[in-house]
Image: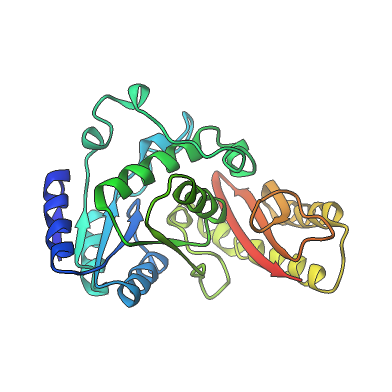
Amino acid sequence: MQVVSSICALRTLIGQWKQAGESVGFVPTMGNLHRGHLSLVGRAKENTQKVIVSIFVNPMQFGENEDLDAYPRTLEEDKAKLIEAGADAVFLPRVEDMYPGGLKQQTFVEVPDISHVLCGASRPGHFRGVATVVTKLFNMVQPNAAFFGEKDFQQLQVIRTLVQDLSMPITIHGIPTAREDSGLAMSSRNGYLSESEKQIAPELYAAMCALGESLKQGEQGFTELAQKTARRLNETGFATDYVKIVNAKTLKPATHGDTALVILIAAYLGTTRLIDNLPVNL
């Protein structure tokens, strides 16, 4: 596996691949890799001839009171996992290369509407940071396809929208959420949970599945069902940020005419913010 840190070296490598007629698959990450990330690498290998993974903890998507400095950085372990997974290259840009003028002077990309609801309302500016760094990485890597986990459902929709709106010739693949045996969605932030919190955390998935079954059985009091699920979580030990039932494409509140829905949940367990989602087709 090749390790590249500079944009110049990256472009030289990608140019060699493309000159040889090889398609490029891209997996952007913030490191601290788990089985979910590696499944993205596997899917990229199935769909493209060369696979490159980026590891960059993006300061632009962290708010003032969020965990940028505490975010786990496990570079050597990550590289070993990527070698085992069969990645062809890893790109390790520096903050000063990504944002040479500093964050306050950085041109940004912002996707309207869906960036400002749900997690966007709870974390102002978060999706501006996501959209900007993904656009920059896409411009640097010039992939044929990019691979993202569906756990960050709103993020995936933001990226799909910006690729469509900016006419980028990139196919976006959403890969199903990787889960622990308990059902808990795999996430780098799960490492923040205490042992007692890890026992409670799977209730998030259980409550979401119960809500999904209610929808499939024909219940349509969407607001009341969401409120009931939030109460269940709060009684278990969570502090619920939101439980929403929305149109899977627009992320607007579900109406009785919608058939493709998704349940979106964000909740704190202690100081750790967990998110999850469940598509429901009626």
Q: Is residue 278 above or below residue 165?
A: below
Residue 162 x, y percent position in the rendering: 47, 46
- On the rendered image, what quadrant is the N terminus found in? bottom left
- Position of 145 with respect to 204 (left or right) is left
Query: Which residue is nearer to you in this view: 209 or 268?
Result: 209
- Position of 158 with respect to 2 (left or right) is right
Q: In this view, does 25 lie above or below 68?
A: below
How does the figure colour the protein chain or chains? rainbow
Residue 55 x, y percent position in the rendering: 28, 52
Q: In this view, does 210 lie above or below 135?
A: below
Question: Image quarter for residue 205?
Answer: bottom right
Query: Which residue is nearer to you in this view: 139 or 10?
Result: 139
Residue 15 x, y percent position in the rendering: 15, 57
Asked if residue 32 can be seen in this view, the reply is no
Residue at 25% x, 52% y is: 141
Asked if residue 235 can be seen in this view, the reply is yes
- Position of 41 with respect to 162 (left or right) is left
- Position of 85 with respect to 3 (left or right) is right
